[in-house]
Amino acid sequence: MYRSESALCVFRQDKGSPRGSLNEPVISYRTIATDKTIFPRASLVFIDTYLPKDVGGSTKEIVFRGFVLDQDTGGAIRAPGRCDVYMGEGDTAGLLAGRTYQEGKMYYLFLKTDASMLGL
């Protein structure tokens, strides 16, 4: 518990998986964090990039093309050109995340609204 003159914060320890900004469990290599003033929350995104992977104790860059969920934010992500991929928990995941800096492409998928549904 944290208390100040103007606020009281109560923290609850959760023994489950880490949770993102949507308060849902994050999934290794399937959760991304972006600037929510630019990108919409809870979006399905296709990414095409290179990501580090631990292969027999050494790190290799592998092609990663797949669907992810934009369900997290990050303190250092404050621009349209930034995206962090959640690598998981533990020392290995931390080392991989620290070595990740690749350019890539993100494609957000949206449902197209049919004008007839709007009564137009």
Image (cartoon, grey):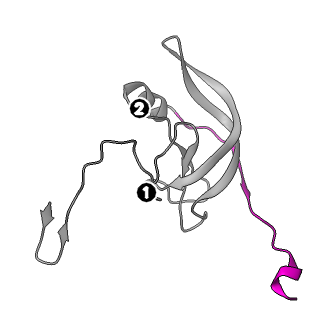
Instruction: Name the residue beneath numbered marker 2.
Output: 94
- Local secondary structure at mark 2: helix
Mark 2–mark 1 Cα distance, whole angstroms, equals 21 Å
Q: Which residues are magenta?
A: 100-120
* Residue 54: x %, y % from top left: 52, 20
Q: Secondary structure at mark 1?
A: loop
Residue drawn at 58 percent across, 59 percent down: 42
Q: Residues within 10 Å of mark 2 (few under 14, many from 20)?
A: few
Left or right: residue 115 compared with residue 26 = right
Give 109 or 5, whichever is nearer the viewer: 109
Identified by mark 1, the residue type is Asn
Image position, residue 66 (x, y; %): 70, 39
> Sequence order check: which comes first, mark 2 or mark 1?
1
Q: Quadrant of the N terminus?
A: bottom left
Vertically, is 57 above or below 24? above
Vertical placement of residue 26 versus 39, above or below:
above
Question: In the figure, is residue 86 to the left or right of 68?
Answer: left
Most foreground residue, 88 or 96:
88
Name the residue that disc number 1 marks. 23
Q: Are marks 2 and 1 in contact (CB under 8 Å)?
A: no
Name the residue: 67% across, 54% down.
Answer: 44
Q: Quadrant of residue 63?
A: top right
Q: Please, what is the three-letter code of the amino acid marked with disc 2?
A: Gly
Q: On the rendered image, what quadrant is the C terminus found in?
A: bottom right
